[in-house]
Image: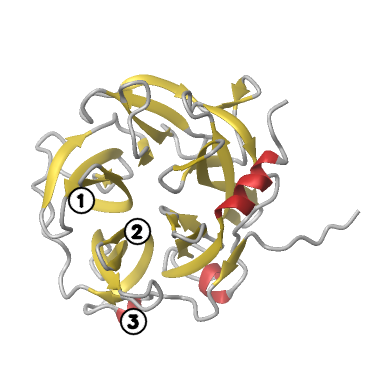
Amino acid sequence: MSFIKERLLKKYENNPVMSPDRMPIQALYTFNPGAVKYKDEYILMMDVTGTDDIHRIWLARSKDGYHFTPDPQPPRWPAPDPTHPEVNTYDPRITKFGDEYIILYASDLGQNECRIGIIKTRDFKIFERVSTASELGNRNGALFPEKINGLYCRLDRPFGDEQKPCSMWVSYSPDLVFWGKSQPVTYQGKPFMDGFKMGAGAVPIRVEEGWLELYHTVSTTCNGFIYRIKACILDEKDPSKILGYTKDFILWPEYDYENRGRVSNVTFICNALPEEDGSLKIYYGAADTNIGLATGSIRDIVNACLENRES
């Protein structure tokens, strides 16, 4: 038996594609972007941390998907929910839904009292608040790009106590405001746990077999956490059911820009962009400091998931 496998995701040779020294302000970190193709450009909605240690979302744009230029200023953010005066905003996932782009992000009071915030836009210039859409202790919200059984559907990760294991859940809503029918993601009829903790990464991608989801999984070591990426296939009509998943990691920290930074040993994703040729572009957070690019084949990742298909 051979243990040598071809990589499913290959890292861009000129990584990172974004780093703090490319920002128009004095920035400490640029990481964990949502990403989307809008008209004739690629847009990253990055987490950017200034010297005030506040995380803000900032946009960067590219014509070719490789060379990005950050906007001169951060976007004009909608007024905060009066019941939840957020301080930090980070880890956005962008879902194209009809002619709107719906963005789920981590809305944090600054003491890790985090909820899922939802805003929307049509042009990435004007943003409108939709809701604060979870109780405290929930993030990693990723909205499916179509309704399931007549309801909006999202992946999320209620965590309560960050020092305890936590995993992916599915929640439903009639209007993006009120959410319920929450249930854990399962595999072979049991709640699925992959690592010490795990959570949704990319917005789910429709494939022939169901929904392809790339997620982060966290391992514990004597020196802290390691964040790596795997993938699974979710059932088309009941996305709480995993049909198969990759036994092996498909993206992991190995280079200096991924191993040294605000949080060491991290590869973290909030996006996976399908291209017309069947490939994916993934812009990933590296050590909570830089942004890297990895590419791969959708079909190859799906096939790797199906090698571990539910029996």
Q: Is residue 28 above or below residue 45?
A: below
Q: Report the amino acid beneath label 2.
A: Ala
Residue beneath label 3, please? 21
Quadrant location, the C terminus = top right
3D distance between C-alphas at marks 2 and 3: 20 Å
Asked whether disc 1 touches disc 2, contact meaning CB atoms under 8 Å apart, the reply is no
Q: Position of residue 74 (x, y in %)?
A: 17, 65
Tag on residue 35?
2
For numbered disc 3, what is the local secondary structure?
helix
- Relative side of 204 to 117, left or right: right
Tag on residue 171?
none
Q: Is residue 13 above or below residue 51?
A: below
User: Viewer-proximal residue, 121 or 179?
Assistant: 121
Camera-side mark, 1 or 3: 3
Going from N to C along the chain, the mark reached first, 1 or 2, is: 2
Q: Position of residue 7 (x, y in %)?
A: 67, 62
For numbered disc 2, what is the local secondary structure?
strand
For numbered disc 1, what is the local secondary structure?
loop
3D distance between C-alphas at marks 1 and 3: 24 Å
Q: Position of residue 88 (x, y in %)?
A: 25, 52
- Relative side of 229 to 143, left or right: right
User: Viewer-proximal residue, 120 or 114?
Assistant: 120
Going from N to C along the chain, the mark reached first, 1 or 3, is: 3
Residue beneath label 1, please? 87
Asked whether the viewer can see residue 104, the reply is no
Looking at the image, which residue sits at the far right? 1
Q: Report the amino acid beneath label 3.
A: Asp
Q: Position of residue 25 (x, y in %)?
A: 22, 77
Figure quadrant of residue 118: top left
Asked whether disc 1 touches disc 3, contact meaning CB atoms under 8 Å apart, the reply is no
Tell me the crowding category of disc 2: few under 14, some 14 to 19, or many 20 or more residues within 10 angstroms, Cα based.
many
Q: Report the amino acid beneath label 1.
A: Val
